[in-house]
């Protein structure tokens, strides 16, 4: 990270502990995710350990730690979807694409996330890919749908 | 009773109690002998209120508040074990246990199992499963017993997490974790190491460092504090996993560095099974570093411990009885002329051993030839380093310091207790500056990291000294030659130190093997005088000061007097009734291989490669067998510091007691006892001691007052000895010729994880992971240019040596420099070395 970039990330902050969340938000906004390098910089700036920063950041589902894929798969694990097999869908994607939630495929085509309630519980289980919502998903349909994204 | 009174009246379980205001309900209960079950609360940690095991009923409060977070108030009526509370606790406990492997908790066979545990694990048995290493020492078991829980009414949900075994010293099985957060809190609040955090949340919550890093990668110091506070078996010490409960404990002083932490040895039968910090407010306030916490057991229980005296001759080893061994030693020594005798003793030995050793050389052998390999460890900086102690201050002064300068200090593994004190000082608002050319663990916390160019450290300190001289105002011109933004930082630091109301300087080991080390230490001394700072040198050897004050150097007599001091020599003549040898052979440890050949070399706790080639006959007295078969030597087994009584003087000058916890293995004896037996066999007077306490009394009577043996005064003694060690100064290494490409600069440190001449890595499995051996640090860019990748064998050479080491790529290693840590005996001489590097051809 160049020094201009660093200034851009930290400008306006005093280096106090309360600055952590706003800085994380700014990083995510600018870079799309929170990289290891960014965590290191923040740690130097705020004098908080990288471990604590990661702990705080990983608590909030808004932060991600891998570069987003070209397409992003969100599998709902809210109560309704969980009961109707959301986890099985996650397992299927994990096997199909060889990534765990929070990760991005090596080719950058997909990333996978688990989310809480997408707000259409009646249609559970629900999967969202980019802006498209797919309801009453099954493993087989999900695999087919994935073919449509490049 | 007014609001301001210090106590409040409460009613707990129908008892009227008067307790301190500000206590929590839990603390009030505990101080009055009322048991409330807890899982996440811990006396040394801030209240967390996470497990809800400690819920109680308080009249007028809704629901059940947690006792560990609720402060007592005037007139509170508290009930700790109503049936409702107990039922609720049971419910909560079941929920916790539904995620926790519980075979040891609610199994039908629990009772039988305890009795018939004799079966070998992994055999096909129906009783006696032992899932958790904490069996019988588990707080969860205690709470289950207390609540008489015998079944779990919820569906079990095991997380099936992988057991993390990749880090040294302890394993982590988070399937057993109840997320009480104690490990996180101790790591943050007490150690300020901040390695652990809760990650994710809800049902996915796990504990660990950032990303998927190992503890090693995340900066963990392996202090073991988290392992100690974990109420379950989730965190368990590798070396003590299945040892069970200790039957007794002994408080003693750690012998692995000059901090001199107080530790509790855990003993089972005749075996040390663990070491934990003692609650000692004077030195280490309940902390240990990785060496004290995790290395002691493996060191003292190693199979290479010597058990019987042996005679080694041309590859054969014959076991001897002590009588035979003593006779053999006496026979060789009786015919050895004073000038042909030499003795080296390790500063890891106790004062009593050191005193007897020098008395043996001076009185029994009539020879001044006693020395220590410490001389070669410190090299030409030895005298200047020792001078720093004359301005030294106790460690506890860090608490009062406003500005702390750390010179060449790294406190991640060794001396991490000092690192803890530094971080506490920082939290309190003290400013911290660190001078170090290489990456080190203070870099993150320091306000300013002065990063001198490798080889220009003395110049940097000289600038600081000049800038802080009273008559000079800090001026820009003084800092020339450092460049790269350093000048501004230097000015800031100089101003800071000059205006500090209570500055302190900590001296670590980075510069000990430097070719200008003596200058560096002299400059540190002057800087301290300029700004009125205290100095805290942190020696690697636990009893370095003991070796000076007991006089185990040719130039120094007991009490630290110069051996040229005739008045003192007359005094010793009187008390020992011998003439001290007045001849000077000029012999010392650095002349071993170059000086005239000795007839007998006596090594105590010293381990030199090829030592049996240095004299006609060698007596090798140590706790481990020699590294290689010896040609002709008498090998005598001594006791480790856990097996003998005595005293050490730590780096602050504090006299501390070492206590015998177990018997030495086999026939091994304390060093002083072996020496006394040989001296008596030789017919010498003044060696009739039967305990270390008697020797201690003689020292106190005739040399210096060390206080009573059983209650040594732990106040630091004034460190103002008069004798000095002679050191030669090296020729300054030539300047690089202009125009020529600068070769790589290699900096080699001497390993400090040493006990009695042996590297801890030889005996302690985990130590090999934290103290890399023969690894040479190189900057990633340089590595790329040379086509070197991590782990490659590389050849580092110059005119004087050629060595093959393993490449270790370190981001912050300064460009065109290399660093390696070597055993003292493999020393390459004073740093830095101009070397060439290449990947080894395969
Ligand atoms: S060993 Fe010490 S530094 Fe490492 S995680 Fe545990 S408490 Fe923290
Ligand atoms: S590892 Fe131990 S101390 Fe840490 S949260 Fe789990 S149970 Fe508590
Ligand atoms: S800091 Fe030194 S004395 Fe303390 S535990 Fe570590 S090695 Fe032992
Ligand atoms: S639970 Fe999945 S949409 Fe609500
Ligand atoms: S002990 Fe009080 S909530 Fe855990």
Image (tube, coloured by chain):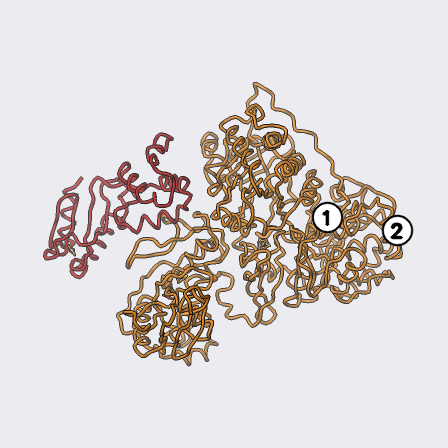
Residue B337 lies left or right of residue B451; in this view the side is right
Q: Circle 2 sits on which residue?
A: B570
Of helix, strand and loop, which one carries label 2?
A: helix
> Are the residues under badges 1 and 2 in a single subunit?
yes
Chain coloured red: A
Which is more toward the observer, B324 or B212? B212
* Residue B455 visible in the current orientation: no
Q: Position of residue A103 (x, y in %)?
A: 28, 46
- Residue located 80% across and 63% down the image: B677
- Would you place residue B292 above or below residue A108 in this image? below
Q: Circle 1 sits on which residue?
A: B372
State whether label 2 is within 8 Å of ligand 3. no
Chain coloured orange: B
**Image quarter for residue B729?**
top right
User: Mark 1 against mark 2, which lies toward the viewer?
Assistant: 2
Q: Position of residue B322 (x, y in %)?
A: 76, 65
Q: Pointers 1 and 2 in contact (CB under 8 A)?
A: no
**Image quarter for residue B523?**
top right
Which is more toward the observer, B96 or B389? B389
- Furthest toward the top, the residue is B739
Q: How many marks?
A: 2
> What chain letter is assigned to the residue under label 2?
B
Residue B191 lies left or right of residue B539; in this view the side is left
Of helix, strand and loop, which one carries label 1?
A: loop
- Furthest toward the front, the residue is B2
Which is more toward the observer, B145 or B322? B145
Residue B342 lies left or right of residue A65; in this view the side is right
Which quadrant of the figure shows ligand 3? bottom right
Q: Residues within 10 Å of mark 1 (few under 14, many from 20)?
A: many
- Residue located 51% across and 32% down the image: B489
């Amino acid at each position: 990270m160049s020094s201009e970039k660093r200034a851009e990330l930290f400008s306006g902050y005093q280096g106090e502990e309360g600055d952590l969340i706003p800085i994380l938000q700014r990083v995510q906004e600018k870079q799309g995710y929170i990289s290891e390098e960014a965590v290191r910089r923040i740690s130097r700036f705020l004098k908080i350990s990288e471990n604590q920063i990661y702990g705080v950041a990983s608590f909030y589902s808004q932060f991600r730690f891998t570069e987003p894929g070209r397409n992003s798969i969100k599998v709902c694990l809210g109560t309704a979807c969980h009961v109707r097999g959301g986890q099985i869908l996650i397992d299927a994607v994990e096997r199909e694409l060889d990534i765990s939630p929070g990760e991005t495929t090596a080719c950058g085509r997909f990333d996978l996330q688990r989310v809480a309630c997408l707000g259409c519980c009646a249609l559970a289980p629900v999967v969202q890919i980019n802006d498209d919502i797919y309801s009453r998903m099954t493993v087989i349909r999900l695999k087919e749908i994935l073919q449509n994204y490049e | 009773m007014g609001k301001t009174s210090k106590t409040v009246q409460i009613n707990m379980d129908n008892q009227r109690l008067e307790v301190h205001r500000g206590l929590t309900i839990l603390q009030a209960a505990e101080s009055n002998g009322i048991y409330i079950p807890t899982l996440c609360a811990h006396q040394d940690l801030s209240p967390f209120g996470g497990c809800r095991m400690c819920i109680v009923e308080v009249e007028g409060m809704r629901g059940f508040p947690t006792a560990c977070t609720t402060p007592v108030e005037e007139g509170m009526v508290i009930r700790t074990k109503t049936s409702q509370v107990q039922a609720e606790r049971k419910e909560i406990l079941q929920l916790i246990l539904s995620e926790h492997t519980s075979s040891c908790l609610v199994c039908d066979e629990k009772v039988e199992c305890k009795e018939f545990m004799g079966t070998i694990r992994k055999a096909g048995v129906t009783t006696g499963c032992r899932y958790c290493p904490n069996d019988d020492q588990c707080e969860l078991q205690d709470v289950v017993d207390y609540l008489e829980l015998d079944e779990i009414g919820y569906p079990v949900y095991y997380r099936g997490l992988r057991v993390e075994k990749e880090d040294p010293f302890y394993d982590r099985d988070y399937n057993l974790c109840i997320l009480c957060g104690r490990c996180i809190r101790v790591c943050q609040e007490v150690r300020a190491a901040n390695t652990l955090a809760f990650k994710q949340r809800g049902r996915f919550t796990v504990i660990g460092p950032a990303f998927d890093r190992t503890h090693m990668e995340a900066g963990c110091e392996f202090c073991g504090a988290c392992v100690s506070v974990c109420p379950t078996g989730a965190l368990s010490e590798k070396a003590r996993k299945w040892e069970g409960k200790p039957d007794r404990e002994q408080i003693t002083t750690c012998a692995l560095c000059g901090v001199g932490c107080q530790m509790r040895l855990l003993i089972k039968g005749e075996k040390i099974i663990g070491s934990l910090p003692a609650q000692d407010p004077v030195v280490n306030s309940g902390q240990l570093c990785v060496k004290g916490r995790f290395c002691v057991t493996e060191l003292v229980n190693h199979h290479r411990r010597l058990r019987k005296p042996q005679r080694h001759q041309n590859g054969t080893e014959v076991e001897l009885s002590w009588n035979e061994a003593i006779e053999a030693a006496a026979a060789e020594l009786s015919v050895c002329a004073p000038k042909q005798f030499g003795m080296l003793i390790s500063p890891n030995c106790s004062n009593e051993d050191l005193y007897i050793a020098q008395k043996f050389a001076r009185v029994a052998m009539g020879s001044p030839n006693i020395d220590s390999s410490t001389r070669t460890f410190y090299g030409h900086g030895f005298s200047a380093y020792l001078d720093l102690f004359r301005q030294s201050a106790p460690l506890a002064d860090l608490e009062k310091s406003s500005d702390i300068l750390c010179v060449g200090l790294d406190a991640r593994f060794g001396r991490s207790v000092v690192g803890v004190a530094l971080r506490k000082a920082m939290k309190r608002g003290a400013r911290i500056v660190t001078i170090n050319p290489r990456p080190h663990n203070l870099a993150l916390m320091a306000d300013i990291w002065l990063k001198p160019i490798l080889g220009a450290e003395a110049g940097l300190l000289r600038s600081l000294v000049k800038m802080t001289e009273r008559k000079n105002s800090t001026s820009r011109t003084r800092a020339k030659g450092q460049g790269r933004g350093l000048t501004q930082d230097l000015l800031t630091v100089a101003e800071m130190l000059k205006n500090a109301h209570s500055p302190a300087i900590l001296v670590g080991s980075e510069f000990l093997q430097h070719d200008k080390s003596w200058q560096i230490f002299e400059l540190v001394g002057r800087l301290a005088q300029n700004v009125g700072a205290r100095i805290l040198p942190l020696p690697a050897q636990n009893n370095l000061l003991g070796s000076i004050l007991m006089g185990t150097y040719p130039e120094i007599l007991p009490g630290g007097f110069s051996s040229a001091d005739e008045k003192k020599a007359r005094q010793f003549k009187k008390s020992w009734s011998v003439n001290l040898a007045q001849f000077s052979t000029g012999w010392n440890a650095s002349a071993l291989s170059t000086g005239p050949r000795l007839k007998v070399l006596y090594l105590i706790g010293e381990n030199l490669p090829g030592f049996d080639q240095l004299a006609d006959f060698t007596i090798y007295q140590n706790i481990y067998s020699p590294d290689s078969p010896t040609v002709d030597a008498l090998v005598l087994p001594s006791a480790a510091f856990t097996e003998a009584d005595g005293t050490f003087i730590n780096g602050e000058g504090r006299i501390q007691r070492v206590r015998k916890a177990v018997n030495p293995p086999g026939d091994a004896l304390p060093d002083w006892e072996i020496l006394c037996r040989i001296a008596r066999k030789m017919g010498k007077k003044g060696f009739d001691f039967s305990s270390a306490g008697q020797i201690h009394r003689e020292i106190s009577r005739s040399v210096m007052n060390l206080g009573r043996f059983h209650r040594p005064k732990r106040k630091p003694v004034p460190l103002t000895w008069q004798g000095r060690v002679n050191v030669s100064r090296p020729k300054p290494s030539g300047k690089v010729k202009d125009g020529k490409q600068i070769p790589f600069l290699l900096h080699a440190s001497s390993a400090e994880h040493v006990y009695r001449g042996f590297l801890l890595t030889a005996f302690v499995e985990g130590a090999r992971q934290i103290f890399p051996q023969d690894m040479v640090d190189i900057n990633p860019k340089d590595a790329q240019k040379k086509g070197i990748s991590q782990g490659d064998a590389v050849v580092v050479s110059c005119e004087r040596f050629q060595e093959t080491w393993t490449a270790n790529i370190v981001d912050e290693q300064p460009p065109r420099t290399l660093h390696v840590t070597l055993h003292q005996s493999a020393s390459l001489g004073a740093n830095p070395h101009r070397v060439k590097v290449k990947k080894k051809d395969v």
